[in-house]
Image (tube, grey):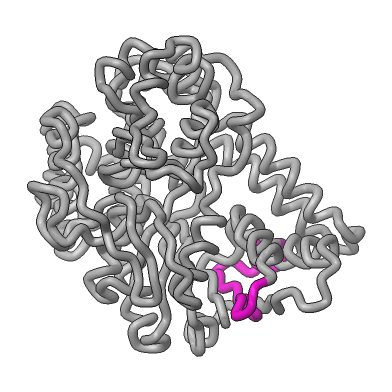
Amino acid sequence: MRLTILGGGGFRVPLVHGALLGDRAEGRIRQVTLYDTDPARLAAMARVLADQTAAAGLPDAPAVTATGDLDEALRGADFVFSAIRVGGLDGRAADERVALGLGVLGQETVGAGGIAYGLRTVPVARELARRIARTAPDAWVINFTNPAGLVTEAMAEELGDRVIGICDSPVGLGRRIARLLGVRPEEAWIDYVGLNHLGWVRGLRVRGRDELPRLLADTAALESFEEGRLFGADWLRSLGAIPNEYLHYYYFNRETVRAYQEAERTRGAFLRDQQAAFYAEAGRPALPPGAALAAWDRARAEREATYMAENREAAGAGEREESDLESGGYERVALALMRAIARDERTTLILNVRGRGILAPLDAAAVIEVPCLVDANGAHPVAVDPLPYHATGLVTAVKAVERAVLRAAASGSRADAVTAFALHPLVDSVAVARRLVDGYAAAHPGLAHLR
């Protein structure tokens, strides 16, 4: 089996590679091809993976090759991971800066920042999907690229159900809830539904019994984990559900925007500077064996410890607990997804897929984030109960924004771009939407046509 990673110089690639090294089953991935447009990042990441392989001491570890030729990378692939970042971390930092300058959120997947990132990314994702369909028509595409739901829907226009989006947020949330309830995650059915970075755990069933009410009734338990500290026990009980952590941007928007405005650096600027230092160190000539992997480990630990720091500050939630520093597990989701498809090892995973009309009032082509049964024929969304009105309102509003982004990316129309910003619940003014378009057009050469 052959896996191609688009964005193969990206920082999180070693997580995927580590999961592959741990897979000893028959029919596992034997060859990994890294593709990236940045030769220096590609070379540095190849060093990290070589260190990982050496540390594992496996004689039959997957062979890793790197290339800057897209067709070469795609040819013969069984699975393609799309993990690209159009505009790099400089682009993310600019997205945050422009939005915060106008008093609105600039996060990379939520609000104005997510829209700007989507406008840059969707045209590239569509072209990649066309290239995959032409060069590797039998490949399954697993999308890691943010905004994950939006980009998956764009790629599905070309690839249909052969593209599946994944995210580690629902996995991490479900694992934390199960741990608090003393339940093994693999034994529980997690009733999770929504869009990417906009979903709710509404139940956690073990042997037919919903255990979530037991957690909601226990204030001390609720306040002992990440989401409980972010949202507060009273608000979680009012919702009767546990929201994805990204909903903190909606429920506590003013406080979060203020915390981001007062921060010394935005998250994108922090990651830009941190990763620049990592890639410079990992790319040094004559690096001792193991040094590139050690540098990556240090950078990853710092990255996890500072995740959503401004939100925790706004909520008075304090530092992250050690149990929250564990990777969300998107690499394990990806491995389980590949195994289910390649070997027909049937499983249930929370994925981003076309909903086929199971979540009213969204249409069949709308990509949603829900539990799916996965087998050799792909991912099949499971029927879900309707969302309450407050959640339906958010989901439909954000899906309307995503559709406007898809139109704007295809048409190049300023009016469509303004519509995308103006419709978002966290952009409260058409006038601000117009200024956002002007700001992003000035900041990103690829959006200059929107002026």
Q: Which residues are magenta?
A: 25-44
At 69% from the left and 70% from the top, the residue drawn is 24
Furthest residue in direction front, as rendered: 207
349 horizontally vs 419: left or right: right
Relative depth, front residue between 344 and 132 = 344
Q: Position of residue 317 (x, y in %)?
A: 51, 14
Q: Is residue 189 above or below residue 145?
A: above
The residue positioned 13% from the left and 61% from the top of the image is 364
Q: To which quarter of the image does residue 289 belong?
A: bottom right
Q: The N terminus appears in which quarter of the rendering?
A: bottom right
Height in image: 128 above or below 212? below
**How many discs appear?**
0
Magenta highlight on residue 95: no
Q: Give the residue drawn at x 11%, y 30%.
A: 389
Considering depth in this image, is 201 or 161 the residue closer to the camera?
A: 201
Give x and y (percent) for residue 430.
Answer: 11, 33
Picture coordinates of residue 33, whole percent (x, y): 60, 77
**Residue 218 found in image quarter:** top left
Observer able to see residue 434 = no
The answer to whether residue 194 shows anywhere in this view is yes
Q: Position of residue 226 (x, y in %)?
A: 50, 25
